[in-house]
């Protein structure tokens, strides 16, 4: 990925409500139009590792947190509280490969539709030139 990191490691915690050991995003590359970009280097201590591979549930959580980082970044830019988000559904998911410990995930979140507190996203996750997964996810935001 040729994008520059805007926020990484500890700064990610300002964008998402999750806290260790459930943090599944460690880089935020920014927003271009209706797409945002994140990353995760899979560490050996990650709670979603099994037999040296990142499990499907970890990939789903990574996608959800990638979407949350986008919302958090926008909220921080506008000086408003970062809302909690909840996965409503995951559709059309195809997992092509399971990434391994040490792999770096690069994720694109594309906004397909936003209606009130519901956002439909399309996600593409890669490691290097390899497609890890693609899916659609419906996310509900709990706004105060």
Image: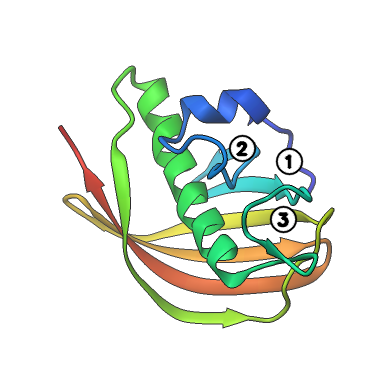
Q: Circles 3 and 1: CB distance less than 8 Å? A: no
Q: SS at mark 2?
A: strand
What quarter of the picture does the C terminus occupy? top left
Q: Nearer the viewer, mark 3 or mark 1?
A: 3
Residue 68 lies left or right of residue 30; in this view the side is left
On the picture, is 133 further left or further right than 74? right
Between tags 1 and 2, which lies in front?
2
Q: Is residue 35 left or right of residue 46?
A: left
Disc 3: CA contacts within 10 A as few (<14), some (14-19) or many (>=20) = many
Q: Identify residue for label 3.
A: 105
**Sequence-first disc among 3 and 2:** 2
Q: Residues within 10 Å of mark 2 (few under 14, many from 20)?
A: many
Which residue lies at the image location 63% right of the left edge and 56% below the top edge?
107
Between discs 1 and 2, the one toward the N terminus: 1
15 vs 83, left or right, is: right
For marks 3 and 2, give the CA distance: 12 Å
- In the picture, the disc for residue 58 is none
The answer to whether residue 4 is seen in the rendering is: yes
Q: Does the CB distance between marks 3 and 2 fall below 8 Å?
A: no
User: Toward the viewer: 96 or 61?
Assistant: 61
Q: Residue at x 62, y 53 (%)?
A: 47
- The disc at residue 3 is 1
Residue 102 location in percent, x, y? Answer: 84, 53
Per the image, the residue denoted by label 2 is 28
Query: Depth check: 52 or 61 in front?
Result: 52
Q: CA distance from mark 1 to mark 2?
A: 10 Å
Could you say whether the residue bearing mark 3 is in a helix, strand or loop? strand
Q: Secondary structure at mark 1?
A: loop
Q: Residue at x 48, y 58 (%)?
A: 110
Q: How many residues crowd around disc 1 within 10 Å: few (fewer than 14), some, or many (20 or more)?
A: few
> Where residue 49 sits in the image (x, y, percent)?
69, 61
Quarter of image, res 137: bottom left
């Amino acid at each position: 990925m040729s994008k520059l990191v805007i926020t990484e490691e500890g700064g990610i915690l300002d964008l998402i409500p999750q806290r260790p050991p459930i943090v599944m995003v460690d880089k935020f590359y920014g927003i271009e139009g209706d797409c945002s970009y994140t990353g995760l280097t899979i560490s050996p201590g990650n709670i979603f590792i099994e037999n040296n591979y990142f499990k499907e549930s970890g990939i789903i959580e990574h996608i959800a947190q990638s979407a949350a980082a986008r919302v958090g970044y926008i909220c921080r830019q506008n000086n408003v509280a970062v809302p909690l988000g909840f996965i409503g559904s995951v559709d059309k998911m195809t997992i092509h490969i399971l990434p391994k410990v040490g792999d770096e995930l690069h994720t694109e979140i594309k906004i397909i539709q936003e209606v009130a507190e519901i956002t439909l996203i399309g996600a593409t996750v890669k490691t290097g030139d390899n497609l890890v997964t693609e899916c659609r996810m419906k996310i509900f935001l709990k706004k105060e």
